[in-house]
Amino acid sequence: MPDILLDVQNLVVKFPVFGGILLRRVGDVEAVKGISFQLHRGETLGLVGESGCGKTTVGRAIINILRAMSYRVEISGSILYHHASGSVNLAPLTRKQMRPYRADIQMVFQDPYSSLNPRKTVDQIVGEPLRIHTKMSRGERADRVRWLLEKVGLSSRHMNRYPHEFSGGQRQRIGIARALATNPKIVIADEPVSALDVSIQAQVINLMQDLQEEFGLSYIFIAHDLSVVRHISNRIAVMSWGHIVEIGPAEKIYQHPEHPYSKTLLAAAPRPDPAFNRRRRTS
Amino acid sequence: MNDVVSAGKAPEGGPEGPPLLEIKGLRTFFYTESGVAKAVDGVDLDIAQGEVLGLVGESGSGKSVTALSILRLIPDPPGRIVEGEILYRGRDLLKLSWEEIRRIRGNDISMVFQEPMTSLNPVFTIGMQVMEVIQAHENVSRQEAHRRAVDILTEVGIPDPEQRMKQYPHHFSGGQRQRVMIAIALVLNPSLLIADEPTTALDVTIQAQILDLMLEMKERRAGASILLITHNLAVVAETCDRVAVMYGGKIQEVAPIDALFRTPFHPYTHGLLGSIPSVAGTKAKRLTVIPGSVPDIHQLPVGCKFVTRCPYAFEPCPDIEPPLIEEARGHWVRCHLYPHGGRPAVPPPGEPDKVRPT
């Protein structure tokens, strides 16, 4: 029996649509339509699907930032988080109630350019979660930031620099260091490599795998690039129109997809194999 | 064999006749406050009639600037084409007047850009934008232009084109907008289509449709060629006949598609292939990585541009730029490890460095 860290049951997210002169509520967009899945300790769960399928909303629901991002969003169902001393349903929590768990569930964002505050130094960016969630002294924080930077392949010399002084790949490393600052159990990575160049993508993927092994992290890896998801994930959930249409071990889904949508998606993915593509085109 | 001038030549025995486009010694520089950026620094490349040529590289490699140079779309200042020839059916595009190059654009060579959202004008209907191209280049009546717009939109698979022509770009999805862009690019039946990251902003299923559409449209136009610019090697494998790999403003390797994927010669190509996971086949435990990052364009190395990241770099690499040589038939490489007698000096992907330069 795998050790379940997160148990999502029947999660529904509705965004209200306002219209007319009085901006009355005229309808809803149901971005997530009742999905259930579990995240096991130490695993990577890949969440794939095309734009608009709801994969990003699922990630945001888990870290509980939807209410801050969208006025009168409705979230129902449960997101049970099993922590060391019990379980808690994250779905209905207010910002304040969420705070004790926020250190445990962290996020890495897609765009390494807009997800770092340009007016803060690396030291401040990576140290901020420590300032909020721990009682560390300034000196302890600096030590921890230095250690984190080295863990993600940057140097402590970089501490006083600003984000614009770094390349895209380096910025993503800073984002990862920030996510790891509070010793999280779960990291939700939303398209963490899709803005990066091919050769840099591989570096960041390898780094994420190394860190996972070292710290026993569980990842929810959200991406549209099927080959990247296959590479990093143990299990995969395929999403379409707010539903999980298929979930299972990564290799099973890639070798023997069952749902017609998974089949379509995989068939459409280009492969770095000219001979295969010729066969496909002529058949 | 080691003839630098004709480097990147289309393979002989391929499609008949002289190449459609020959780029010779192209240099496009940008004069900025922080110095001269040599975005394209001596590119030689041929595009044969009827072929699909892929131009692959990471951001800053010079692939898009090469494409923009062909149509003289480099913003000047700060950019300038400082040297080279771009021969289209034997005519040097760089010597044409603005009026003449304007006639080449659309008629002979046209371009599709990455962003289908920003390359259409949001305040004009789709119909107006397709018809504008026809009427700008040909002296035809409105009715005739309208009829041809309907035809081309039908051809690219826009359902109910008569009605949809009255609509604005925001009524169209990303994939449909890219179909419209392809319609605009192909309505005058150009012989060369330059597609710059045409599917990067699209979902995979839509990407497959757009690539299929481009190839289909090419097949229907005898002798037409495509220059496909992309960072995605899987897309190249899917569509191209030949591939040129760019790095640091130079072509590093040119090869027929199978040769490039089966026996990549250049350590950079080799590294790129190792760093992409696949949706099929056995899963690599770890991706091989090209260490470091793309060097600053203002401070490119003097010798080989890849020297700072190359695991095989040896004595001549930092100081002497290797020439682009034809190591195997139709397979060119710019690397000091060659000539190596037709065998790759770099071990195939998956096999760690077994072979070292001697």
Image (cartoon, coloured by chain):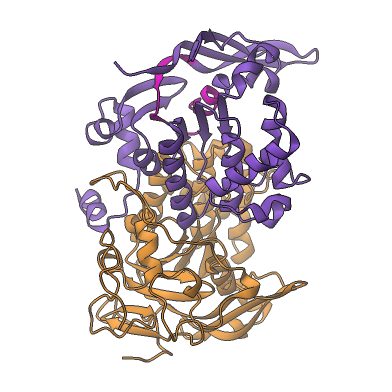
Q: Is residue A158 located in the magenta-colored stretch of the structure?
A: no
- Does residue A81 lie above or below B271 as drawn? above
| Chain A image colour | purple
Query: Toward which corner of the image does residue B168 lie, by quadrant?
Result: top right
Q: Is residue B67 left or right of residue B76?
A: left
When the figure is inspected, residue A245 is found, relative to residue B171, above or below; the finding is above
Which residue: 43% across, 31% down?
A216
Please indicate, yes or no, whether residue B224 appears anywhere in the rendered image: no
The location of residue B286, given as percent across then percent down, is 34, 49
Is residue A160 shown to the viewer in this render? Answer: yes
What is the drawing colour of chain B? orange
Q: Nearer the viewer, residue A274 or B319?
A: B319
Measuring from the top left, give residue A57's x and y in whole percent: 55, 24
Which one is nearer the viewer's eye here, A4 or B25?
A4
- Residue B42 location (% of width, % of height): 53, 82
For the point 73% across and 41% down, which residue is it? A124
Q: Which residues are the magenta region? A: A33-59
